Amino acid sequence: MYLSGFLYFYKMSLSIVLFDDFKERERLLPLVATRPVGNLRLGALTINQKWELLTAGDVSYMTAAYLQDKFPLNPVH
């Protein structure tokens, strides 16, 4: 029964949305002037790559309006 639950979870598609806290975002300038906070590199991977590996799902960003064209928000289908 545990195995069937695991397989069901494995087949589910997840969509993770990384949210930029706009007050804290200002403290990270100029690093986040051209990218969302979730796109910053920590070690070998970016934050979004770590979430993709952990959840096997799609990652999108809710970020500043001027970055939404390059980093669009992908809602759950």
Image: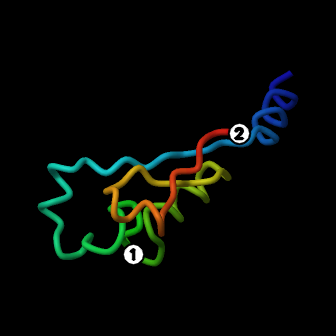
- The N terminus lies in quadrant: top right
Q: Residue 57, relative to residue 6: is it above or below?
A: below
Residue 36 in percent (x, y) is at: 36, 63
Q: Which residue is mark 2?
A: 77
Tag 2: residue type?
His
Q: Which mark is residue 52?
A: none
Q: Is residue 3 left or right of residue 69?
A: right
Tag 1: residue type?
Gly
Of residues 3 and 55, the one nearer the viewer is 55
The residue under the point 80% across, 26% down is: 2
Outermost residue, top side: 1
Q: Is residue 76 left or right of residue 8?
A: left
Q: Secondary structure at mark 2?
A: loop
Of residues 77 and 43, the one nearer the viewer is 77
Q: Which residue is mark 1?
A: 43
Residue 60 in percent (x, y) is at: 52, 54
Q: Is residue 45 left or right of residue 75?
A: left
First in residue order: circle 1 vs circle 2: 1
The residue under the point 46% across, 78% down is: 44
Residue 46 in percent (x, y) is at: 45, 69
The residue under the point 38% across, 73% down is: 41
Q: Secondary structure at mark 1?
A: loop
Outermost residue, left side: 27
